[in-house]
Amino acid sequence: MPEYLVLMKLNPGKIVDTLSDIRKLDEKPVAGVDLCYSINIFGSWDVGMWINAENSSEVLEFVQKKVKNLNGVTDVYTVPTFPHGNSIKTGKNLEKAPLET
């Protein structure tokens, strides 16, 4: 399943509330999208989310209906990626067996 990185810039006055709302998102926030995890980022972007989705239209729906509607999100940038790590993420905090190298 393709992976996507969703980068977000947050309103500095609402960071704590927005991070709380991000952490409350469901593992499957919209049909066809699995939220793997969110990460704090230091630099130009404030937060990132790794998601899995079968196709880009599901990602677009997630970004438009969920991410952009979070109070405090000021900018969103979505990057399609491909896995090359040692394990496959299948949902929030779930892993399959390590990949053979």
Image (cartoon, grey):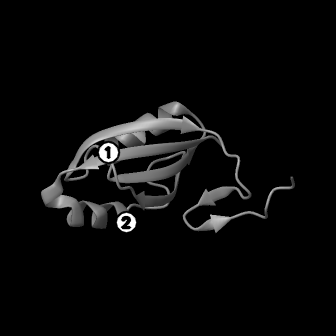
Residue tagged 1:
44
Q: Quick check: 6 left or right of 16?
A: right
Residue tagged 2:
23
In which image quadrant can residue 7 be found? Answer: top left
Quadrant housing the N terminus: top right
The residue furthest left is: 13
The residue furthest front is: 43
Residue 54 spot, x, y in % from top left: 60, 39
* Label 1 crowd bin: few (<14), some (14–19), many (20+), radius 10 Å: few
Judged from the image, the secondary structure of the residue bearing numbered disc 2 is: helix
Say which residue appears at 17% left-offset and 56% top-offset: 12
Mark 2 or mark 1: which comes first in sequence?
2
Say which residue appears at 25% left-offset and 60% top-offset: 18
Residue 21 spot, x, y in % from top left: 29, 63
In which image quadrant can residue 81 be found? Answer: top right
Q: CA distance from mark 2 to mark 1?
A: 21 Å
The residue furthest top is: 57
Of residues 20 and 34, the one nearer the viewer is 20
Residue 76 spot, x, y in % from top left: 33, 40
Answer above or below: position of 64 versus 94.
above
Say which residue appears at 79% left-offset and 64% top-offset: 97
Three-letter residue code for mark 2:
Arg
